[in-house]
Image (tube, rainbow, N blue to C red):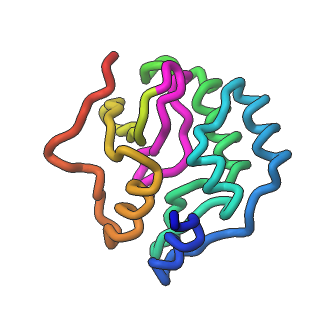
Amino acid sequence: MTPTWRDIIEEFPSALSREPVELQALQRLEQLLGLALPGELTAFLLESDGLLDTYGTEVVWPAERILSDNLAFRGDDQFRSLYLPFDSLLFFGDSGGGDQFAFACRPHRAGVFVWDHETDERYLVSPALESCVRSALSSDGEDWYRAPVRTAWSR
């Protein structure tokens, strides 16, 4: 039997889940961003509208923050002058230190990517949301995604 997101979260007693998001909120998010959410993110949010680790870091943001931050990243003139476009990414969480986790949506690429806010690098850090969540919750506050081997985002 495949574990639910709640089962996975309960493996980490210090993690804080939230009430599920309403399906209508996800449909609104997709409409306003003009893209479909990855199935694994939709499934997660329908069980827990966000997830905090031991230190209060939002490993997975609530749906409203996913919407607001993605709109901000896409619409900020200063960001446009400093960074590569963000239109291909769907940000959904962060490391607590400024780096953001995202799915590549345009074109679709499997796995979870991180955007390094200091270098503007984007690279694959996890094959799926589940392994990303497990790594983040078991990292004890360390930047688990800064592994020596990573797949860079092709520019």
Residue at 71 percent of width and 57 percent of height: 46
Question: Is residue 79 among the parts visible in the rendering?
Answer: no
Q: Is residue 84 above or below residue 10?
A: above
Seen in the picture, residue 145 relative to 7 is either above or below; the reply is: above
Pick whichever, 39 or 2, lies toward us.
2
Taking the magenta stretch, the answer to whether it contains residue 94 is yes
- Asked if residue 72 lies left or right of residue 135, the reply is right
Q: List x then y, in percent, for residue 118.
A: 33, 37
* Residue closest to the far bottom: 13
x%, y% of residue 45?
66, 55
Identify the residue shown where x is 49% and y is 64%.
57
> Which quarter of the rendering shows the C terminus?
top left
Q: Quadrant of residue 37?
A: top right
Numbered label tally = 0
Residue for point 58% across, 74% down: 16
Rendered position, 25 above or below 33: below
Query: Does residue 94 appear to the left or right of 37 in the view shown?
Result: left
Q: Nearer the viewer, residue 73 or 33?
A: 33
Magenta range is: 86-108
Measured along the vertical axis of the image, is residue 39 above or below residue 43? above
Foreground pick, 101 / 36 = 36
Q: Is residue 63 magenta?
A: no
The single residue placed furthest to the left in the displayed view is 148
Percent of width and height locating residue 77 = 59, 21
**x and y percent of residue 111 in the render?**
41, 39
- Of all residues, the one furthest to the front in this rendering is 1
Res 24 seen here = yes
Residue occupying image coordinates x 76% and y 57%: 21
**Res 144 quadrant in image:** bottom left
